Image: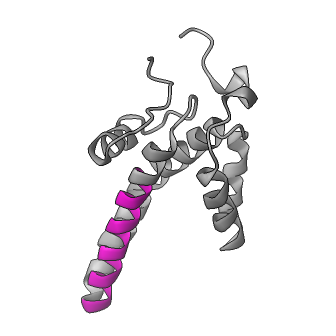
Amino acid sequence: MDKYDPLPDCTFGQAVARFFKKYVQFKGAASRSEFWWAFLFWFGIMVILDILAAVAHVLAIIRLLWALAVIIPELSITCRRLHDGGFSGGWTWLYCLPVLGEITLLVMCALPTRDDRWKEKWFPANV
């Protein structure tokens, strides 16, 4: 298995580690477990920070900094998950559509692996 392959049956710790380790890696694929554990981590931190920001407005800046810090790895893991599902990473532009685009992407990321639809350009040639 090389670094561009998805990691099936990924644990929570492995997913979070790969989320940050593959910070800007848009090529390759991410398994469903890898994506959803990382999503749970990212979303859980956002919920906690939202609650804290509601109590103490000063903490809202920490929530903003967290959101900015994880925007690139969030986009990269979404792009890799789309590749694993047989879709182009260009579909990540759906994030620009409020609510509808995000829901569509979440549904696309929930679909099973379709390696029969993988394209060579989604993976580096010199692996």
Classify residue 101 as left or right of residue 37. Answer: right
* Up/down of 72 relative to 80, above or below: below
Q: Is residue 61 visible?
A: no
| Displayed quadrant of residue 27 | top right
Tell me residue 83's x, y (percent).
64, 36
* Up/down of 60 relative to 23, above or below: below
Quadrant (top left/top right/bottom left/bottom right) for the N terminus: top left
**Range drawn in magenta:** 38-55
Which residue is found at the position 72% from the left and 44% from the top? 90
In this rendered view, identify the residue nearer to me: 78 or 13.
13
Tell me residue 49's x, y (percent).
31, 75
Which residue is found at the position 29% from the left and 75% from the top? 48
Tell me residue 17's x, y (percent).
30, 40
Classify residue 54 as left or right of residue 124. Answer: left
* Up/down of 71 relative to 125, above or below: below
Indicate whether residue 76 is drawn in magenta.
no
